[in-house]
Image: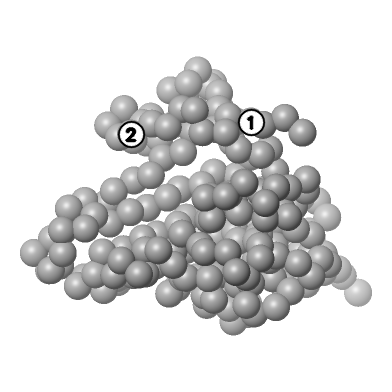
Amino acid sequence: MPLRRRDFLALPLGAATAHAQTSKPNVVILLADDLGTSDVHYRGGEIDTPNIDQLASEGLRLERFYVMPVCSPTRSALMTGRSPMRLGVIYTVIRPWETYGVPLDEHFLPQSFKAAGYETAMTGKWHLGHAKKAYLPNQRGFDHSYGHVNGALDYFEHYRDGGLDWHRDGKGLKEKGYTTDLVAAEASRLIRTRDKSKPMFLYVSSTRRTRRCRPRRS
């Protein structure tokens, strides 16, 4: 399976404020699902992406970062810094009926941030294991988590293969609304309400939908 080149933007939210007794920067990682390297405007794409273009022009661009062209392998590499081949998450995504996830003895990125004194949070798509509690975000270094644990889902009612896939901190949440708007709103809320005495690491992970995700009707 060929590798695909993508751009990653790691965004410092700013230096420590008068409310924070630390010089460590806040860090946000935005992960766009299924975004090709030429889809954004600053790389020749036809769609206007002014905010992304501004971030790219004012920040640091990593233009030789190679990833797998499917979700779970790419996300597992980002969270662990290891090759998906080593993790056993390589040729396809983790399906809703699968019982495996990224091995539990692997060290995740938010665990390193927590050890450095950061408040850690994520919103959006997980897709790194869900069959048992130990695979979920709050057990892998995140203080706060919100979104869904599988891959594609219905964008308005948050169903996947007939089951509800939406949560806050691992607890099921029945909440209607457009998925992308909800994920962005939660990220904004977490930034506004964060513990100002600590720096923050925030992972905002987008998703996509498929026609198979609608809830079953009787």
Q: Residue at x 81, y 66 (%)?
A: 98
Front-lying residue, 176 or 194: 194
Q: Residue at x 57, y 50 (%)?
A: 82
Query: On the image, numbered disc 2 is attached to which residue?
Result: 60
Horizontal and vertical percent position of residue 3? 67, 31
Pointer 1 or 2: first along the chain: 1
Q: Given the image, on which type of amino acid does mark 1 rest?
A: Arg
Q: Is residue 139 visible?
A: yes
CB within 8 Å, label 1 to label 2: no
Horizontal placement of 207 versus 44: left or right?
right
In this view, 217 is above or below 207: below
- Image quarter of the N terminus: top right
In this view, 34 is above or below 171: above
Front-lying residue, 169 or 99: 99
Q: Residues within 10 Å of mark 1 (few under 14, many from 20)?
A: few
Query: On the image, numbered disc 1 is attached to which residue?
Result: 4
Horizontal and vertical percent position of residue 112? 40, 63
- Image quarter of the C terminus: bottom right
Cα–Cα gap, marks 1 and 2: 20 Å
Provide the secondary structure element on which disc 2 rests: loop
Q: Is residue 50 visible?
A: no
Horizontal and vertical percent position of residue 216? 86, 68
Provide the secondary structure element on which disc 1 rests: strand
Horizontal and vertical percent position of residue 166? 63, 71
Horizontal placement of 171 versus 54: left or right?
right
Q: Residue at x 21, y 58 (%)?
A: 24
